[in-house]
Image (spheres, rainbow, N blue to C red):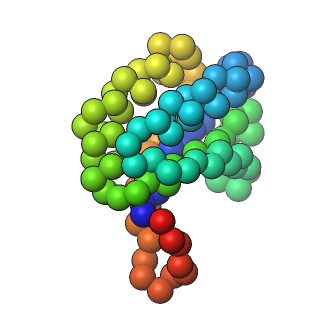
Amino acid sequence: MIIYEVNLEVDESIKFKYAGWLPSHIEKMMTMPGFMNAYWFFREPQFEGKDPKKTLWTIQYFLKDQESLDQYLNGKAKEMRQEALDLFGSEHFKAERRVLYPLAGAGEVNT
């Protein structure tokens, strides 16, 4: 199991529209092979030294394995990312991504 994490920084001017769209985007992501679960988190800007007028969200997608992530990144990723850019424009939000790999002995997660 691995986690594909997307960290969003969204302008106040679009946060409600973005929040209305994001659940359907997450649902589409969950149709990708190997995507098992997803969680949507709110982050406090002041804890990260960010502009308090920005809305910070993190979506963590739990994937079966690296092969599933590679399949997504080499396939549908560009299309899925473009959807947000077309709707909201790159000047109104920022997305950063990272991949998290569990360490042995750090706790058990069964897939």
Residue sitting at the far top: 86
The answer to which quarter of the image holds residue 101 is: bottom left
Query: Percent from the top left, x then y, of residue 51?
Result: 68, 39
Name the residue rendered at 42%, 27% in the picture. 81
Instruction: Tell how many labels.
Output: 0
Counting from the top left corner in percent of width and height, residue 21 is at 64, 23
- Residue 101: in sight, yes or no? yes
> Taking 44 as reference, is 94 left or right?
left
Determine the residue positioned at 35% across, 33% down. 77
Quarter holding the N terminus is bottom left
Viewer-side residue, 49 vs 19: 19
The outermost residue toward the bottom is: 105
| Whether residue 49 is visible | no
| 22 relative to 61, above or below | above
Horizontally, residue 25 falls left or right of residue 100, namely right
Residue 23 percent across, percent down from the top left? 64, 31
Q: Which residue lies at the image location 56% right of the left edge and 16% below the top edge? A: 88
Would you place residue 3 above or below residue 74 in this image? below
The answer to whether 70 is drawn above or below residue 23 in the figure is below
Which residue: 66% across, 41% down?
Answer: 56
Left or right side of 38 for 4: left
20 or 97, which lies in front? Answer: 20
Q: Position of residue 50 (x, y in %)?
A: 65, 44
